[in-house]
Image (cartoon, rainbow, N blue to C red):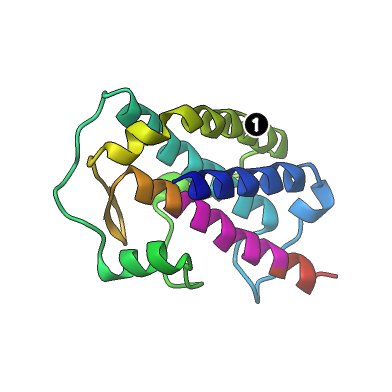
Amino acid sequence: MRRSHAGLLNGIDRSIALAGDEDACAQRRASVSRWSVQQQLEHLLLTDRVILAWLHAVAKGMIASDGLGGPTWRGHVVIGIGFIPRGKGRAPDVTRPDGMELPTIRSGFGEVQDQVKALADLLPTLAADSCTRRHPALGYFTPPRWLRFAQVHHRHHGKIIRDILKATR
């Protein structure tokens, strides 16, 4: 879990730095993604907020499992090899970009960064918890799997952002 935690913090650090570059955030390349760099960041922020709210609630003992299942075979692959294929899924409505302003995205990542740092002392509690929450496409994840997913998700969108910026140079 510590590697996932550190990897997620690295992804958030990169997102904070990128959110400070208005020119980069305005870039869009339809051949890479329908979303601009700013929209990629907004999606990451919205997703992080959902995942972190759940992880903190689990750590505080405030939430029960929403199911008894485990990951789907796709979920096992994503978590196991740390790779999300492009263009194969649709973001849930609650995590779809909706025009959030760049200053809000920047400050939001600062808040998310603080929440992830606060998880450091809770990692043993989360690792021992068998509570699950359903991912819409990948099945039921325990807290360690959700933390791993958040790390992999940041890496996935980081690669898309890199390719958008590379294509617009």
Residue 161 located left or right of residue 84: right
* Location of residue 166 (image quadrant): bottom right
Q: Residues within 10 Å of mark 1 (few under 14, many from 20)?
A: some
Q: Residue at x 34, y 28 (%)?
A: 59
Please say whether residue 34 is one of the residues in the magenta stretch: no
**Residue for badge 1:** 110
Q: Residue at x 79, y 42 (%)?
A: 20
Residue 86 located left or right of residue 143: right
- Residue type pointed to by label 1: Gly
Furthest residue in direction left, as rendered: 68
Circle 1 SS class? helix
Q: Position of residue 64 (x, y in %)?
A: 20, 33
Residue 11 shows up from this direction: yes
Q: Position of residue 34 (x, y in %)?
A: 59, 66
Residue 98 shows up from this direction: no
Q: Residue at x 34, y 36 (%)?
A: 126
Furthest residue in direction bottom, as rendered: 31
Q: Residue at x 65, y 76 (%)?
A: 31
Please say whether residue 154 is one of the residues in the magenta stretch: yes
Quadrant where the image shows the C terminus: bottom right
* Location of residue 156 (image quadrant): bottom right
Residue 160 located left or right of residue 145: right
Count the marks.
1
Q: Position of residue 127 (x, y in %)?
A: 33, 40
Q: Position of residue 82 (x, y in %)?
A: 47, 65
**Which of the pair 35/115 is nearer the observer?**
115
**Magenta region:** 149-162
